[in-house]
Amino acid sequence: MLFSYPGMFIPAIFILLLIILAILLLAPFNLSLDLGKKGPLIWGSIRLAWLGIALRKVEISPQSADELLASIRKEKTGKEDRAVDENKTTGKEVAAATEKKNEPGGKKGREQDEKELDGKRERREKGEPTDATRHPSISSLIDVAPPLAKILWDLLRSIRFKNSSCRLCFGLNDPAQTAIISGYLWFLASALGIFSANISINPWFDGERLEGELIAEIEARLLSPVFAVIKALQVREIRLLLKEMLGWT
């Protein structure tokens, strides 16, 4: 009986879409971190979940930093090899298209390419950008910095830290730099409002050292970045910067 009339079907679909959108925006994403380093060994796990569903999970078995970097490089090399294979296939398609363009029937395509090249050459001679986007000016970046920093700050404060604990022992070659970095870290912890967490930052003044453990559960909602984007678009300086980068001015 609910969908007995055709006119009632569209409002029901609209309400259903609103419910799905509300769930996407309000349901929190949870990021669980368990990372540690002692001596040369590094271990940990990273888990991203939404509504109790694990979206991504990465396990780092105890290994040295060199072994971890080697495994990352090996994975990257594998991706590059796959990309090379895809480019070979794409190259064959491009060669076939070029051969087809060089045929008598492809004269129109060559003329269009020549017109595009002439247009880019003319814009380059006039000092205009040849692509769709432009580099923003220094004055625009200076004008947009204060409102953008405030929006990013509000966005950062919307992130919740739960069940967090951090133990860090670090040192640099320069004791003065070690003390400065330690002060910055304490300031960052205070700014993020995570003083309630079990935090221990111990500067090491007898040379280079980096050891510690981080256990944290971070919660955030998509509503916060969406609201931040809407708030940013209401700022005149940010709108002018976007128009300048898109070449609308």
Image (cartoon, rainbow, N blue to C red):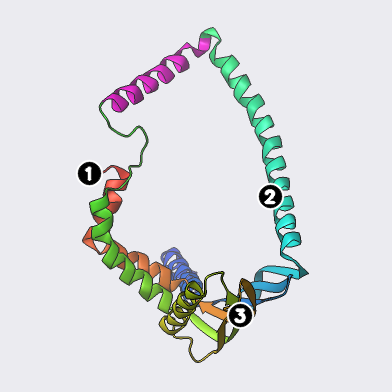
The mark lying in front, picked from 2 and 1, is: 2
CB atoms of marks 2 and 1 within 8 Å:
no
Quadrant where the C terminus lies? top left
Disc 1 residue type (three-letter): Thr
Task: Using a 10 Å C-alpha cutoff, classify the residue at mark 1 as few (fewer than 14 neighbours), some (14 to 19) or many (20 or more).
Answer: few
User: Which region shows up in magenta?
Assistant: 105-125
Tell me which label, 1 or 3, sits earlier in the chain: 3
Most extreme residue toward the top is 104
Tell me which label, 2 or 3, sits earlier in the chain: 2
Q: In front: 94, or 212?
A: 212
The mark lying in front, picked from 1 and 3, is: 3
CB atoms of marks 1 and 3 within 8 Å:
no
For label 3, the residue is: 169
Q: In front: 238, or 67?
A: 67
User: In the figure, 182 relative to 87: above or below?
Assistant: below
Q: Position of residue 62 (x, y in %)?
A: 78, 71
Disc 2 residue type (three-letter): Lys
Tell me which label, 2 or 1, sits earlier in the chain: 2
User: In the figure, 85 relative to 144: above or below?
Assistant: above
Q: Quadrant of residue 143?
A: bottom left
User: In the figure, 214 relative to 72: above or below?
Assistant: below
Report, in whole angstroms, how far the alpha carbon at label 1 lies from the one at label 3.
51 Å
For label 1, the residue is: 249
**Secondary structure of the magenta portion, mostly?**
helix
For label 2, the residue is: 76
Report, in whole angstroms, how far the alpha carbon at label 2 lies from the one at label 3.
31 Å
Q: Residue at x 68, y 31 (%)?
A: 89
Q: Residue at x 47, y 72 (%)?
A: 25
